[in-house]
Image: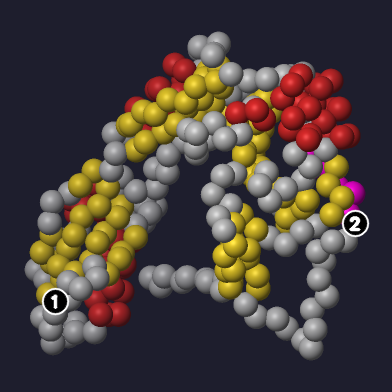
Amino acid sequence: MKFLLSVLLVAVVYSGNAQRIMPSIMAGEAVKSLFGKDQNVSLFESVKFNAGFQLVGINPSDTSDVYAHFYFIVDSVRVFKALKEDWVLHKQVEPAIDQHPFTLYLLHNKEIVRYWNIFPALQSVATDNGYYFFDTSLLTTISQKSYLYYRMQTDTFATQNAFITFKNNAKKNASFLFVVEPNFTYEGSFEMKVHKTPKLDATDDIEEKLAKLVKNIAPKDRCLLLRKSGADDQQSVTFIVEGTKTIYDHLTDATFEKQAWVANIFEAKSFWKQ
């Protein structure tokens, strides 16, 4: 099994709390900038808003209420159609982010369909087609008409099934808005020291052997092999293995020295109307 990693190199230029993202490699003699060109694209161009849909604007990652005056909720098809006509993006800008994004969540039956990040301090929004200038007065206008008072709740779960039970019960509560699902790709992790042998000396050979064993044990399970920094010596290589308990229980070999299994604890943030 071969693990391939595609890396896009970018040069990041810092300006205060903002980071400007610029291509590190330019092809051809000159590259014509798209920034500043008129576009006239609706932010919600491809969105079909019907019964059961909601559009929520909140600050999910920060508790300082820096954008509290922008919070809103839209659950009316008529109001959303007006937004679709009014929220038109006219000018593409340089890609840039800051540490305080304001997020729009499109929900259907209390499930996240998609989201957009707006950066009010930079007056920009990230879209599928790049970054555009965004007039924050649009947020002010909709907030004044449809303000949202909400609270955020953090819960932890030992398994994905426990999370699903929580979400299903939460949906029965009228004040529940949505929950951001944790990443359940890996159930847990463990360290494993692999002792070198005359036939298995190169690190790449050891990693290839591990990958083949994992595939034979659980071909449908996701697994990540990471070299533990500073733990190698002339006789062994140490890996951190992230995956399922099934892989841990069955991954055995005379050259392996496994440490204890450490189950992941999954954290989820849910949002509720007040």
**In the image, what residue type sits under mark 1?**
Ser
Q: Residue at x 39, y 47 (%)?
A: 185
Q: How far is disc 2 from disc 1 in space, using C-alphas?
A: 59 Å
Q: Nearer the viewer, residue 211 or 231?
A: 231
What amino acid is found at the position of numbered circle 2 in the picture? Asp
Q: Is residue 107 visible?
A: no
Q: Quadrant of residue 79?
A: top right
| Disc ID at residue 236 | 1
Badge nearest the viewer, 2 or 1? 2
Q: Which mark is residue 38?
A: 2
Q: Position of residue 5 (x, y in %)?
A: 47, 70
Q: Is residue 9 left or right of residue 157?
A: right
Query: On the image, which quarter does residue 80 sit in?
Result: top right
- Residue at point 26% right, 59% down? 241
Q: Which range is magenta?
A: 38-45
Residue 63 is left or right of residue 132, and the answer is left
Q: Would you say the magenta stretch is mainly helix, strand or loop?
A: strand
41 over 30 or under it: above or below: above
